Every structure is written in C-alpha cells, then in structure tokens.
Image: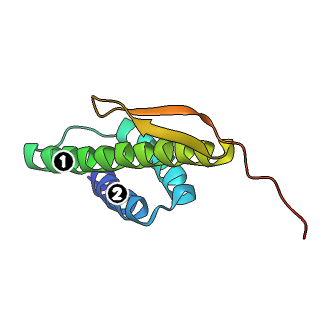
Amino acid sequence: MRSQSDLEAILDKTYAALLRGDMPLMAGLAEETGALADGLGRMDRGKAERLRRKAERNAALLQAAARGVRSATGRLAEIAAGPQLTTYTMRGRKESLGSMAPPPLHRF
C-alpha cells in the first residue's frame, strides 16, 4: 500500500531532520505523519514492526531534543540572573549562597 511506504519515508525524513535540528521541517512532517497514520489500513506484521521501530526511534530522539532545549533554557536563565556564589553541601548537592554583587566600576 502506498501510504505505508509514504509513512516510512516520512519517518526517515523526520529522523534526518531531528539529527540536523531542523525544527520547521519537523513541524510540517508531524502533520503529514498524522494524516498518513490515520489513513493506514491493514498491513503485514513485518511492515508494522518496521514502522513501530522507526516511530520509537524518532520518539526517543524527540525526547532527547526536548531535554536539551529545557537544559539550555535553564542555563540561559542562570546566566541572565547574574553571577551567584555556589558551593556544595556535605552530601555533594549544589547549593546557592546568593547573588554576588558585580564589582564597582572605577574611573582612573
């Protein structure tokens, strides 16, 4: 069936877009994937298993990308907040002791 081959091709394109970080392309491919998946009929077990593996592979990459975006957002927020004095507790946990005032600027 043609839509099965189309869906497999879109899953492969999505994988490549995930590896490149091409967010605009992934958004369009997500819509296409949904439309094709809704129109799938019966298929043989081998084809269904191959589609499932590719979909799971893409889902794992999407989850990793989302974790990376959240991590980067958090780091940018830390940088924007300014310098902070940070130390570690006896148990090895990071602890912030507060913001450090920037050194005063002097004119000579």
Residue 17 location (% of width, % of height)? 43, 62
Mark 2 lies on a secondary structure that is: helix
Q: Nearer the viewer, residue 44 or 75?
A: 75
Q: What residue do we see at 38% from left, 63% from top?
A: 19
Q: Answer yes or no: is residue 103 visible.
A: yes
Q: What residue do we see at 45% from left, 42% from top?
A: 35
Identified by mark 1, the residue type is Arg
Q: Nearer the viewer, residue 13 or 40?
A: 13
Q: Nearer the viewer, residue 60 or 87?
A: 87
Q: Is residue 19 left or right of residue 72?
A: left
Residue 26 location (% of width, % of height)? 49, 54
Q: Is residue 80 left or right of residue 50?
A: right
Q: Residue furthest right?
A: 107
Q: Is residue 87 left or right of residue 4?
A: right
Q: Answer yes or no: is residue 39 visible.
A: no
Label 2 crowd bin: few (<14), some (14–19), many (20+), radius 10 Å: some
Above or below, comparing residue 42 to residue 32 in the picture: above
Q: What residue do we see at 34% from left, 57% from top?
A: 6
Image depth: mark 1 or mark 2 in front:
1
Q: Residue furthest front?
A: 108
Q: Is residue 101 left or right of residue 20?
A: right
Q: Nearer the viewer, residue 67 or 6?
A: 67
Residue 65 location (% of width, % of height)? 41, 49
Residue 41 location (% of width, % of height)? 27, 38
User: Label 1 to label 2, Cα distance in Å?
Assistant: 16 Å
Identified by mark 2, the residue type is Asp
Q: Is label 1 in contact with label 2 (beta carbons under 8 Å)?
A: no
Name the mark on residue 6. 2
Mark 1 lies on a secondary structure that is: helix
Give the mark, 1 or 2, whose residue is nearer the N terminus.
2
Check disc 1 and report the residue beneath it.
53
